[in-house]
Image (tube, helix red, strand yellow):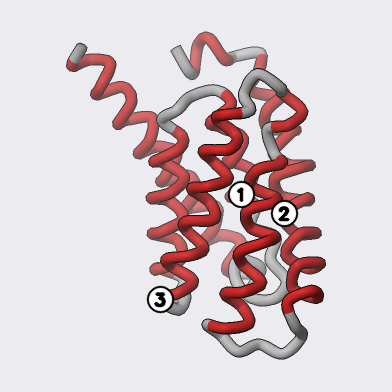
Amino acid sequence: MKQKKAYFITQAAVIAALYVVLTMFINAFNLANGAIQVRISEALTILPYFTPAAIPGLFVGCLLSNFLTGAAIWDIVFGSLATLLGAIGTYLLRKWKWCAPIPPILANTIIIPFVLTYAYGLPGGIPFFMLTIGAGEVLSCGILGMILLFALQKYRDVIFK
């Protein structure tokens, strides 16, 4: 029993660390925050398809990433909650492989435009931000995430016992 709990915590921690590292990398190109975001770390939001440990891992990873990239408090809170909701949704839809990226795409496309508008006061409007954030999420979660899902599918029983 203790071994299972330790394995769960280890998986969550590794996923959180990967999320932070990938976000910090893409932040060097100014693509982690702002009106146009292509967080390659969001590709990891398909991991709840394989393991429930990804849910807290993604949440903590996003929380730390938002804090470390200097995001506003409302972005830290609501951006991390968007990733959490997306991860939970992916886990709930795990029986349908092709649905795995849909929850994080929707959660971020709906929540983040309000954060950009009200926390940062960026000009452009919510519909514009829904378009830009949605496009970035489709690239990150939909395309990169599905590539990752198919790459990990072969090793599912080895990596995600």
The span from disc 1 to disc 3 (Cα, nearest Å) is 20 Å
Dot 1 or dot 3: first in sequence order is 1
Q: Position of residue 71 (x, y in %)?
A: 47, 75
Nearest the viewer among 35 and 13 is 35
Q: Which residue is mark 3?
A: 73
Q: Are marks 2 and 1 in contact (CB under 8 Å)?
A: yes
Residue at image position (47%, 45%) is 58
**Which three-letter amino acid code belongs to the residue tagged 1?**
Glu
Distance between the alpha carbons at the discs numbered 3 and 2:
22 Å
Residue 86: give its label.
none
Give coordinates of residue 147: x percent, y percent: 75, 33
Residue at 33 percent of width and 25 percent of height: 8
Does 99 sit left or right of 94 as displayed?
A: right
Q: Position of residue 155 (x, y in %)?
A: 59, 14
Residue matched to label 1: 42
Kind of residue sitting beneath label 3? Ile
